[in-house]
């Protein structure tokens, strides 16, 4: 594939799910098992996810080293389960220093965890519940394809409660591939022409904004 040619709806060119060595891809992941973050206060995290969000604390693991890498960092690892069985997990490791602030505030905006509910009305009920529990909430926001509210947990992790408002919000592969090809083409042209990339992608994003369509 060239830089602006991407895979088919099945996720690979011309229907071939083969690596260079001939290995065959074993399908696709079935579900989200867990997503993991760092917390500096597991007790506060547990209170928020159980009492405020209603997620059960379903497992906790302690170890004096990280099994995958062997790093000698003692930790407490907790898991909170959502209705579909997927979990949000946390590590508390007291020896870790606080993270430095990101170089741009949008890093903390873009990086977030979105949790789906069944209707716009349910999103609105969550908004009222969170505010009743002194949680600062942004929204609701109508994204045209989803309807969402945003807030942060005790560790500052940005969370979203959302519901789809379009039946194709996550089933629009042809347009997604075309948009990615156009995005990559703009980046390529900016590099070749010596044009300011930020200006070019700003113009493209403004022209293609789903909020204005």
Image: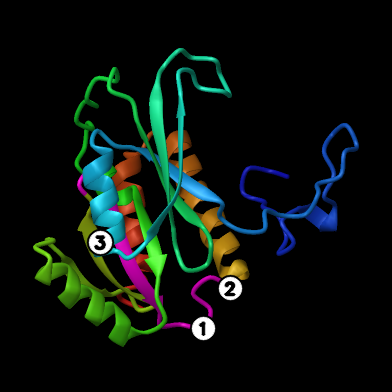
Crowd tier of the residue under label 2, counting other residues whose Cα lies within 10 Å: few below 14, some 14–19, many 20 or above: few
Crowd tier of the residue under label 3, counting other residues whose Cα lies within 10 Å: few below 14, some 14–19, many 20 or above: few
- Residue sitting at 23 percent across and 81 percent down? 124
Mark 1 highlights which residue?
Answer: 167
Q: How many marks?
A: 3
Mark 3 lies on a secondary structure that is helix
Specify the quadrant that holds the C terminus.
bottom left
Q: Pick the residue in front: 208 or 156.
A: 156
Residue 157 shows in this picture: no
- Residue sitting at 21 percent across and 45 percent down? 44
Q: Is residue 139 above or below residue 1?
A: below
Crowd tier of the residue under label 1, counting other residues whose Cα lies within 10 Å: few below 14, some 14–19, many 20 or above: few
**N-terminal-most mark, 3 or 1:** 3
* Residue 108 percent coordinates (x, y): 25, 44
Q: Nearer the viewer, mark 3 or mark 2?
A: 3
Mark 3 highlights which residue?
Answer: 51
Extreme-right residue of the structure: 22
Residue 150 shows in this picture: yes
- The reply to whether the C-beta atoms of the residues labelled 3 and 1 are less than 8 Å apart is no
The secondary structure that dominates the magenta segment is loop
Q: Residue 10: say if magenta.
A: no
* Residue 12 percent coordinates (x, y): 76, 53
- Residue sitting at 21 percent across and 37 percent down? 104
Q: Residue 159: say if magenta.
A: yes
- The reply to whether the C-beta atoms of the residues labelled 1 and 2 are less than 8 Å apart is yes
Mark 2 highlights which residue?
Answer: 171
Mark 1 lies on a secondary structure that is loop
Q: How far apart are the two marked residues, 3 and 2, measured between alpha carbons?
A: 34 Å
Q: How far apart are the two marked residues, 1 and 2, measured between alpha carbons?
A: 8 Å
Magenta residue span = 154-171
């Amino acid at each position: 594939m060239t830089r602006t040619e991407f895979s088919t709806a099945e996720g690979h060119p011309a229907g071939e799910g083969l690596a260079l060595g001939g290995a065959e891809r074993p399908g696709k992941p079935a579900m989200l098992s867990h997503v993991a973050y760092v917390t500096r206060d597991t007790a506060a995290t547990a209170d928020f996810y159980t009492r405020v969000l209603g997620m059960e604390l379903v497992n906790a693991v302690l170890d004096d080293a990280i099994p995958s890498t062997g790093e000698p960092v003692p930790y407490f690892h907790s898991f909170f389960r959502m209705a579909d069985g997927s979990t949000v997990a946390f590590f508390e490791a007291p020896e870790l220093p606080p993270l430095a602030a990101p170089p741009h505030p949008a890093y903390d905006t873009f990086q977030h965890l979105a949790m789906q509910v069944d209707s716009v009305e349910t999103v609105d009920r969550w908004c009222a519940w969170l505010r009743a529990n002194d949680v600062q909430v942004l929204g609701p926001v109508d994204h045209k394809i989803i309807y969402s509210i945003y807030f942060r947990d005790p560790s500052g992790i940005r969370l979203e409660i959302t519901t789809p408002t379009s039946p194709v919000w996550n089933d629009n592969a042809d347009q997604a591939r075309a948009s990615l090809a156009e995005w990559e083409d703009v980046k390529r042209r900016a590099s070749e022409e010596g044009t300011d990339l930020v200006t070019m992608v700003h113009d493209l994003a403004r022209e293609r904004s789903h909020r204005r369509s």
